[in-house]
Amino acid sequence: MRNIDVHQVADAARFNRFHARVLLWCLAIIIIDGYDIAVAGAALPAIMQQMGVTASTAGFMASSALFGMMFGAVFLGTLSDRIGRRPTIAICVFLFSVFTAAAGFTSDPVTFSVMRFIAGLGIGGVMPNIVAQMTEYAPRKIRSLLTTAMFSGYALGGILAAVLGKQLIGEYGWQAVFIAAGAPVVLLPFILKTMPESLAFLSSRADKAPLREVLNRMQPGLHLTADDRLVVAHKDVAQGASMARLFQDGRGLSTVMFWIAFFTGLFMIYALSSWLTKLMAMSGYSLGSALSFVIALNLGAMVGAIGGGWLADRFHIKWVLVGMYALGGVFLYLMTYKSSTEVLYFVIAMVGACSTGAQIVAYAYCGQYYPMAIRSTGIGMAAGIGRLGAIAAPLLIGLIVALNLPLEQNFLVIGAAGVIGALALAFIDHGRSDSVAAPATAPQAAPSIGAGVRA
């Protein structure tokens, strides 16, 4: 009989077809999620014009989904550690697809906001679950890269929203880009059938056959049988996923610092995603040109996410993040200067790299920081608290726009958030991170239950 460390199998596995399937599923869901987030910002000028709403009201409409995302991240992130990640992800996809499409059939701000709130539950809930899923199954050596590459689908979704917005809004109205969001419901049966369940959830079940099957697919050379004993560290076994565990074992300060960093990071992202099109239009650019800036922002986010993940696998992920957040504030400040269109495209792309791209790396870091059993809970709470920043951003920028203050004031406020986030990240106690361990090696037969269990 062999004692096999479940966590060590996941760490030491080589990337194969199983990992590719997990990556592609997570990427597809994040693309859809990113589209549903960005679609409101892309359509905001047309919505304001047709519904005849003020900037302040439009800011509230944009924030309605963010309120839902806050509750969804907290409750659906925690729920997955209790009922399983696969059904929770399916619930989230249903919510954000159906109710984003439903928003396209509304004609008044209140009904629109209600539909976006319900959609926001799914949008917010799916993020911590997808990040935790990719973090669990990605080989240790390329974990940050795979997680951030997967999360770059968020930017792809934003680009898709801008491209479809340019093609459809002028001809068919803003409703078309919302109704199109309902298509992904056809994926639900395939998600429930083919996406693997959480390792922590499988480890907590009495029947270990599904866990053995997943481990054999991760490392085909293991050839696990019913005689092999699967060893899981106590901290990695699902035990109700109490939020109190986020503050145990010296993680309290770092948990709060993650919350602050997520607050400021999401403040930057949603200030830009909700108002960049409008702010650039106020600067004299046409709707088409303003949407092109959104595409540049999201292309930069993809480069920042993948590049940041690559750096995080080779250097200290914490300090990579500190640098990215700080640079986000610097480039947002540079947007206050008059420059050529080419330079402006570059600056906006760098803003995307160091705001959305940095936040994606922050999700990866948060996922690696917490033990497997509370990973979705940890990410979900950080994302949920962060949603307060996402909620505040469109409202605050909307008030500034309504006051007709100089355009520079908007970008200075957004940039200051990046500096605060960098300071919060600097105070995280990396020594308490679950990712701090000896390099992963192939799992070996162990003489006792505790042998090989990662600390």
Image: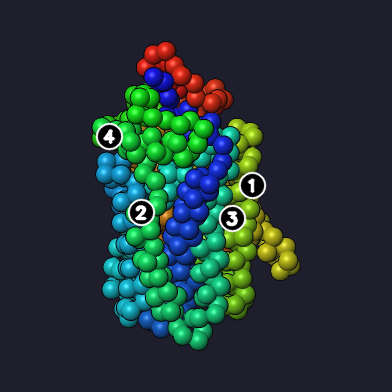
Along the line of sight, which residue is nearer the eye, 378 or 429?
A: 378
Along the line of sight, which residue is nearer the eye, 142 or 393?
A: 142
Using the image, tell me which numbered label, if any, was put on residue 307. 1
User: Could you tell me residue 243's position as x and y percent?
Assistant: 30, 36
Q: CA distance from mark 2 to mark 4?
A: 19 Å
Q: Which residue reaches farthest top?
A: 447
Using the image, tell me which numbered label, if any, was put on residue 193. 2
Whether residue 170 sits left or right of residue 63 in the image: it is right
Amino acid bearing label 1 = Gly
Q: CA distance from mark 3 to mark 2?
A: 32 Å
The chosen color scheme is: rainbow
Above or below for 260 versus 435: below
Q: Which residue does the image show at 71% across and 69% down from the upper left?
A: 341
Chain-order first, disc 3 or disc 2: 2
- For numbered disc 2, what is the local secondary structure? helix
Amino acid bearing label 2 = Lys
Placement of the C terminus among the 4 image quadrants: top left
Residue behind mark 4: 207
Above or below for 375 versus 189: above
Chain-order first, disc 1 or disc 3: 3
Residue behind mark 3: 301
Nearer the observer, disc 1 or disc 2? 2
Chain-order first, disc 2 or disc 4: 2
Nearer the observer, disc 3 or disc 2? 2
- For numbered disc 3, what is the local secondary structure? helix
**Neighbourhood count class around disc 4 (C-alpha, 10 Å): few under 14, some 14–19, many 20 upward:** few
